Image (cartoon, rainbow, N blue to C red):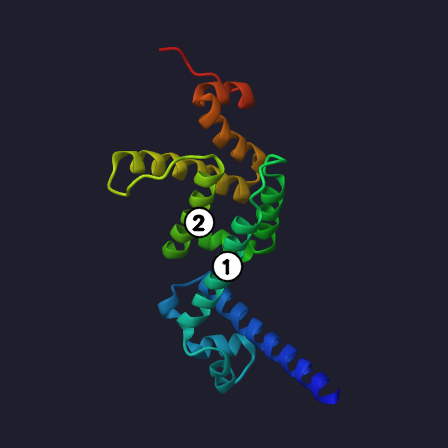
């Protein structure tokens, strides 16, 4: 029993130290390029010894990889486990909003501000795949014209979705309503019916 308590206390302390390293790195990363960040600057801000750093990470870039992997795993989890359309995707939208709110410190720079282009592109790819499946758009060969048409269409909708997460100017429900409405009713009808946006006559 004492051994179990000791191990849990040790693991808790280890996780706390790792978190301190991550946050120290992130405070530096939001102000400067990663190649300008040193192990020494991280350890000084975290208040730990250099040897302690290397118990958790091999190098500075490994911290960013850890952050990106954690955030992408969370996005994949939500996209995989919240797929019901019975309630107009309410469960998925709530889960996505909760995920973004809880991780905005990381997701705003990485996803919305393209602080890391690889992360931003991969996250958008995951969201596009889910949206394509949810609204029933067919798959085409990547060399076909139809693929590029659908990819461009989905890209625009995903940018709207991400903007909703980031700015909170319009509810997420409207982003999905826009996507499904365009597919089922057409762009002009959807904009007028659900958003009260009318096209200007030529």
Question: Which is more toward the observer, 62 or 95?
Answer: 95
- Specify the quadrant that holds the C terminus: top left
Q: Residue at x 60, y 34 (%)?
A: 88
Question: Which is more toward the observer, 25 or 3?
Answer: 3
- Image side of residue 86 versus residue 31, left or right: right
Compared to 182, does 171 lie above or below? below
Q: Alpha-carbon neighbours of circle 1 within 10 Å: few (<14), some, or many (≥20)?
A: few
Q: Alpha-carbon neighbours of circle 2 within 10 Å: few (<14), some, or many (≥20)?
A: some
Say whether marks 1 and 2 touch (CB < 8 Å): no
- Image side of residue 8 versus residue 132, left or right: right
Toward the right, the furthest residue is 1
Q: Is residue 171 visible?
A: no
Q: Residue at x 26, y 34 (%)?
A: 145
Q: Is residue 91 visible?
A: yes
Label 1, on which residue? 73
- Specify the quadrant that holds the N terminus: bottom right
Q: Quadrant of residue 171?
A: top right
Label 2, on which residue? 126
Spot occupied by residue 170 in the image (x, y as percentages of width and height): 57, 34
- In terms of secondary structure, where does tag 2 sit? helix
Spot occupied by residue 17 in the image (x, y as percentages of width and height): 58, 77
Spot occupied by residue 187 in the image (x, y as percentages of width and height): 44, 23
Compared to 3, does 197 lie above or below? above
Pick whichever of labels 1 and 2 is earlier in the sequence. 1
Compared to 197, does 31 lie above or below? below
Q: Residue at x 44, y 22 (%)?
A: 186
Spot occupied by residue 48 in the image (x, y as percentages of width and height): 55, 82
């Amino acid at each position: 029993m004492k051994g179990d308590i000791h191990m849990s206390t040790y693991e808790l302390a280890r996780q706390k130290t790792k978190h301190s390293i991550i946050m120290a790195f992130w405070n530096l990363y939001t102000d400067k390029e990663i190649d300008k960040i040193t192990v020494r600057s991280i350890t000084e801000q975290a208040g730990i010894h250099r040897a302690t750093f290397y118990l958790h990470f091999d190098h500075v870039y490994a911290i960013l990889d850890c952050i990106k992997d954690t955030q992408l795993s969370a996005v994949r989890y939500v996209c995989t486990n919240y797929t019901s359309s019975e309630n107009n995707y309410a469960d998925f939208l709530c889960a996505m909003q909760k995920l973004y709110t809880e991780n905005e410190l990381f997701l705003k720079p990485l996803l919305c501000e393209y602080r890391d282009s690889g992360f931003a592109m991969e996250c958008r790819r995951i969201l596009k795949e889910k949206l394509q499946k949810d609204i029933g758009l067919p798959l085409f060969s990547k060399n076909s014209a139809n693929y590029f048409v659908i990819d461009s269409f989905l890209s625009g909708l995903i940018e709207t979705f991400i903007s909703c997460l980031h700015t909170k100017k319009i509810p997420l429900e409207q982003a999905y309503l826009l996507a499904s409405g365009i597919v089922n009713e057409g762009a002009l009808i959807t904009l007028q019916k659900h958003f009260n946006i009318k096209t200007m006559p030529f």
